[in-house]
Amino acid sequence: MRFERAELVRRYAISLASLLAMLLGWEVFARVGAYPAFILPGPQDVLARFAAYSATGRLWPHVAATLQEVFFGFSLAFSLACVLGYLIAHSRPLERAVLPVLVTAQALPIVAVAPLVILWFGFGITAKVLVCALISFFPMLISTVVGLRTIDPRLIEVGLIFGANRWQMLSMVEVPLALRVFLGGVRVGLPLSVTGAVVGEFVAADQGLGYLINLGRGLFDTPLMFVALFILATIALVLYEAVVLLEHVVTDDGQL
C-alpha cells in the first residue's frame, strides 16, 4: 500500500485554512459588534482565559477526567458492538428479538436517559462511562451487522470448502472484508462518546469538561465555557482523524 503523503498534507492544509478563516471571522464579528466578553468573547479572550486557567493547574484534571470517561465508555461500547453485531449478523431470529429493543432505546434522548443512569449507578465514573457507551454503541453495532452481511456469500463458501474453522473465517475472511464498513461506524461512535461524557457530567459531576462548562455558566465566565468547548471539539476531531488515518493504513485504498 502506498501512503499518499501529498494528499494527506493537502487535506490538512485545507482544514487548517478553514479553521483560521473561521477564527478570523469570529474575531472580526466580536470586535465590530463590541460585544462584552460575557456575551461573546473573541478568540483572543478565550486564548487568554485558557492560558490563565491552565496556569493554575486546575484545567488538566478536568481534561483527564473526561478522557478517562471517553476511553472506558468507548471501549465498552466497542466490545459489546463487536460481539452482539457478530451474533446478530449470523442469526435472523436474534436480530428480530433484539434489534427492535435496541432501536427503541436508541430513540430515547440521551439527555433524558442520563439522569436515570446517574440515579441507578451513582455519581461516580461508572454512570458517565455507561452514558458514553449508550450513545456510541448503536452506530458501531449497525456498522458491524451491515459490514458482515455485505460480504459476498461465495467468499464464505470458498473458505468453508478449504476447511476453514469459525475462527479462521472470522480473522481471515469476515474481519478484513467488513473492516471498512465497521470503521465507518467507529468514525461516528468515537466522537459521540465525547458527547456522552459531557452529558453525564452535565447531570452530575464535580470534575470534567462538562462540569467546567456548567461552572463557567454559573459564574457568567463565558470565556471559560469556550475554553472547555474548544478542548472538547479538539478531542473529538483528533479521535475522528485518528480513525480516518487508521482506515487509510489498514485498507488498500482508504479515503482521505
Image (cartoon, rainbow, N blue to C red):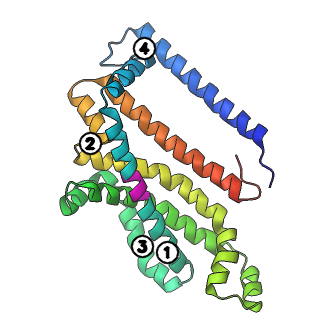
**Which residue position is annotated with label 3?**
100
Mark sitting on residue 207: 2
Instruction: Report helix, strand or loop for mark 4.
Output: helix
Assess disc 1: are there few (<14), some (14-19) or many (≥20) residues with their C-alpha within 10 Å of its C-alpha.
few
Mark 4 or mark 2, whichever is nearer to me: 2
Assess disc 4: are there few (<14), some (14-19) or many (≥20) residues with their C-alpha within 10 Å of its C-alpha.
some
**Residue positioned 73% across, 91% down in the render:** 163
Q: Magenta stretch?
A: 69-74
Left of 159 or right of it: where is 123?
left
Q: Nearer the viewer, residue 101 or 242?
A: 242
Mark sitting on residue 30: 4
**Residue 91, image x, y percentages:** 53, 84
Asked whether 62 falls inside the magenta stretch, the response is no
Mark 2 or mark 3, whichever is nearer to me: 2
Distance CA(mark 1)–CA(mark 2): 32 Å
Q: Amino acid at mark 4?
A: Ala
